[in-house]
Image: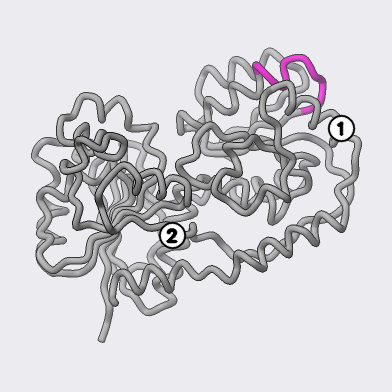
Amino acid sequence: MIRHLHIISSKVPWPLDSSFSINIFYTIKSLHQEGVKIHLHYFYNEQGLHPTDLNQYCGSIHTYPATSIDSDKGNTELTERINSNNYPLLVEGLSCIKLLSQISDTNRVIIVRMRNEDAHLTKIQSNSFINKIFRAAFNKDSSQDLPSKFRYVFGNEEEAESFRSTTSFLNINYLPVFIPSQSVSSEPGMGIFCLYHGDLSYSSNQDSAIWLISKVFNDINTPLVIAGKNPGKKITKLAGLFTHLCLISNPSTTEMDELIKKAHINILPSFSKSRPELKLVHALLAGKHCVTNEEGVAGTKFSDACHIGKNAAALKSIILQLYRRPFEENEIELRKKIFRTINKETPVNTLMRWLYG
């Protein structure tokens, strides 16, 4: 018997240049390898990307204009497709959850995977339905506004526990993130620059890059490369003020891999605990020294493999010390040990059990 699954995503999970894309893409790939026929539904903007790379893992792919995701009328085409059968449904984030008000949930398994919603906060404040849902996640008194019969899963154990403690919901779970092959390929020795990378079209990544430029690398001459998709005017202008900073816009996957490998320090601070930073995973698998803050490793097993600073001054001190220190074999062995432990976690098996029993 063929098992089917609908996945609704607010954007196309490609290219693999953000935690969002990586997690969804490897979820799709892992489920495909388990024999699940994926029906992917995603929203696109005017410059929308429609990659063929997903075709081999999906039974069908359906795209919709991004303007319909928050429409009061919803998306009739999407809801009709999903309501034409009773396949399980995986919803990626609160930004898509409004659509559930129009989808039949009778005897249908529905899982909502929670993620960082900072890009949608302004919309949430002006949308009564979504606002109720958002308040429900953080306000015990309004928890009835969020459908309690769905299963809500988090990629961060602390966030799952926080949500559980503020609601009466029973189906709140931790699900490890889906990531690519976890073979450590880091090489010992010296790199030639510091690197911050990420999808710079996300406000959270923009804020991190701007913070690094203005608070950490503003008065130290250690070379910093910032690389990512669609950097805004503010980052571009700010980076141009410093001779030891270089901004690389829209690098290819191969170019990004080379940057991570060649950097002596991958510096990846985070200002959100709502999900593990998969770009940190990428850096630990392929790069040399990794520097972050406490939020960057919250709810993960990576603390021992990273150099952690509590504030800008601490990060400056760590960077200045590490930049002259070779990356050594014992640090690679530590990472291999950590990832051997993580490899024992099988999120696809857990997800399959929730979806199909």
Which residue matches tag 1? 321
Residue at position x 49%, y 31% in the image:
204
Q: Label 2 sits on what residue type?
A: Leu
- Left or right placement of residue 61 versus residue 130 in this view: right
Q: Which residue is mark 2?
A: 175
Q: Secondary structure at mark 2?
A: loop
Location of residue 314 by image quarter: top right
Residue at (22%, 65%) from the top-left corner? 109
Residue 356: image location, x then y, percent: 28, 75
- Give the image location of residue 143, x and y in percent: 21, 41
At x 38%, y 68%, the residue is 351
Q: Which residues are magenta?
A: 214-223
Residue ID at (80%, 58%): 332
- Residue lying at the far bottom of the rendered structure: 1
Q: Quadrant of the N terminus?
A: bottom left
Could you tell whether 224 is left or right of 105 in the image? right
- Residue 222 falls within the magenta-colored stretch: yes
* Above or below, 128 relative to 244: below
Q: Are marks 2 and 1 in contact (CB under 8 Å)?
A: no
Which structural element holds mark 1? helix
